[in-house]
Image (tube, helix red, strand yellow):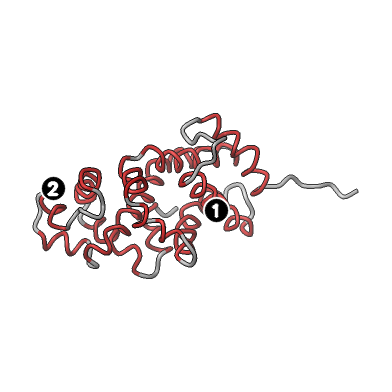
């Protein structure tokens, strides 16, 4: 089973994940420095020089990690956070014995990142215009490709192949919608609310019960 980083880079054949690829080669301390800078100053005000200083490396090292310069920084942060999420919960997903347990675990972890992770919340609260366009119209397709690549090994244990991509698309859209703009009746920080959402609406949609012929 490919790891989260390998699945991500395989899913994104264009340049969208270049920032993460470069950062991965320099190991995690560089992205940890990015996270600290974004929380401290925001994504827009963070410069590559700030990152180099925070990480204790030369500017050339940072420019090699983010070959697109500042314009690629947002992409690198998003890619890193997605991979970090799946790496953190991969064992729990692999240990799920049922589709119900799998989806609850995955949706809970994803919504947890969107509501609790200090980097993600900082960007969504103060600089949403820098990331929201990446989840709109044709750019959403690339995020859905990433979600499908990362979800496939887990969903395929419980669903037929033809149902895996529709299921991953639906779950990714659900997480984005309820993470970016939760309705008044849903608390993304409440595990019981997440369980009800998944079991009442998501599971019947991705794994509808068989109807016996009359």
Q: Quick one: SS at disc 1? A: helix
The answer to whether residue 46 is left or right of residue 213 is: left
Name the foreground residue: 29 vs 137.
137
Q: Residue 27: which disc?
A: none
Write the residue at 65% across / 38% down.
200
* Residue occupied by mark 2: 54
Which residue is the site of mark 1? 168
Percent coordinates x, y for residue 75 in the rendering: 32, 59
Can you give x and y, in whole percent of width and height, for residue 192 in the image? 55, 29
Q: Residues within 10 Å of mark 2 (few under 14, many from 20)?
A: some
Q: Is residue 152 above or below residue 36?
A: below
* Residue 25 horizontal/vertical position (percent): 23, 58
Mark 2 secondary-structure assignment? helix
Which residue is painted at 84% across and 47% down in the image? 212
Extreme-right residue of the structure: 214
In the rendered image, the residue lying farthest to the bottom is 14
Instruction: Report crowding for label 1: few under 14, some 14 to 19, many 20 or more residues within 10 A (C-alpha).
Output: many
Above-or-below relation of 195 to 78: above
The residue under the point 28% across, 63% down is 72
Image quadrant in which you'd find residue 61: bottom left
Question: In the figure, 70 relative to 204: above or below?
Answer: below
| First of labels 1, 2 by sequence position | 2
């Amino acid at each position: 089973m490919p790891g989260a980083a390998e699945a991500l880079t395989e899913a994104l054949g264009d340049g969208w994940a270049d920032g993460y690829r470069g950062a991965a080669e320099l190991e995690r301390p560089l992205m940890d420095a990015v996270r600290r800078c974004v929380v401290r100053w925001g994504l827009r005000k963070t410069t590559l020089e700030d990152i180099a200083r925070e990480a204790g490396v030369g500017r050339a090292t940072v420019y090699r990690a983010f070959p697109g310069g500042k314009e690629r920084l947002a992409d690198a942060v998003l890619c890193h956070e997605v991979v970090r999420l799946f790496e953190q919960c991969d064992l729990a997903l692999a240990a799920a014995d049922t589709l119900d347990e799998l989806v609850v675990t995955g949706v809970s972890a994803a919504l947890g990142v969107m509501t609790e992770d200090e980097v993600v919340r900082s960007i969504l609260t103060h600089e949403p215009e820098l990331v929201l366009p990446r989840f709109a119209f044709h750019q959403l397709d690339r995020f859905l490709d990433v979600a499908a690549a990362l979800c496939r090994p887990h969903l395929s244990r419980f669903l037929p192949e033809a149902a895996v991509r529709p299921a991953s698309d639906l779950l990714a859209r659900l997480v984005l919608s309820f993470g970016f703009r939760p309705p008044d009746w849903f608390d993304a920080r409440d595990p019981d609310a997440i369980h009800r959402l998944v079991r009442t609406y998501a599971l019947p949609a991705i794994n509808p019960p068989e109807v016996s012929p009359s």
